[in-house]
Image (cartoon, helix red, strand yellow):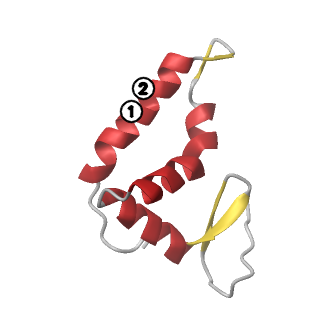
Amino acid sequence: QAFSCTSGVTKCVAGRGRNMTQQDFESVLNGAIQGDLKALDRLLNFYQPLIRKYSYANGRLDEDLYQQQIFRILKQVRRFEFSGKVGA
């Protein structure tokens, strides 16, 4: 699936129906790792469709599973080792 980016940046990542430049994504990820709550919220919003997709059991949204996934992301994001480039 191809995603366009009109800001002149060669690489973009897609999430929640909009584009984010790779530079923006790296900034958000780095902020979330460092404990910036706004960045963490933006990261969760970016991945919300994917989190929701994997929260279904037997064809129904499992709220407990959804909450467990959010909790794990919140718990693990600060452990993530970010080298400074995504996809490099």
Quadrant for the N terminus in the image: bottom right
Residue farthest to the bottom, as pictured: 8
SS class of the residue under badge 2?
A: helix
Amino acid type of the residue tagged 2 in the rendering? Gln
Locate residue 79, reporting x and y percent. 24, 51
Q: Is residue 57 above or below residue 15?
A: above
Q: Position of residue 23 (x, y in %)?
A: 50, 77
Give yes or no for contact between labels 2 and 1 (Cβ–Cβ under 8 Å).
yes
55 lies above or below 51:
above
Which residue is labeled 2 in the image? 68
Question: Which residue in the structure is indicated by mark 1?
Answer: 71
- Residue sitting at x 42%, y 62%: 29
Q: Position of residue 7 (x, y in %)?
A: 69, 84
Residue at the extreme top of the image, as rendered: 58
Query: Residue 87 or 71: which is nearer the viewer?
Result: 71
Report whether 36 appears left or right of 54.
left
Examine the rendering and report whether any part of residue 29 can be seen.
yes
Please tell me which residue is depicted at 31% across the width and 65% down the height of the picture.
Answer: 82
| Whether residue 65 is situated above or below residue 16 in the rendered picture | above
Q: Residues within 10 Å of mark 1 (few under 14, many from 20)?
A: few
Q: Residue at x 43, y 53 (%)?
A: 40
At label 2, counting other C-alpha atoms closer than 10 Å, the crowd grade (few under 14, some 14-19, many 20 or more) is few
Query: Label 1 is placed on what type of residue?
Result: Phe
69 sits left or right of 48 in the view: left
Left or right: 24 in relation to 6: left
Quadrant that contains the C terminus: bottom left
Which quadrant of the figure has residue 3? bottom right
Asked whether, in this view, residue 12 is left or right of residue 1, the answer is: left
Residue at horizontal 51%, vertical 47%? 44
Q: What's the CA distance linking mark 2 and mark 1? A: 5 Å
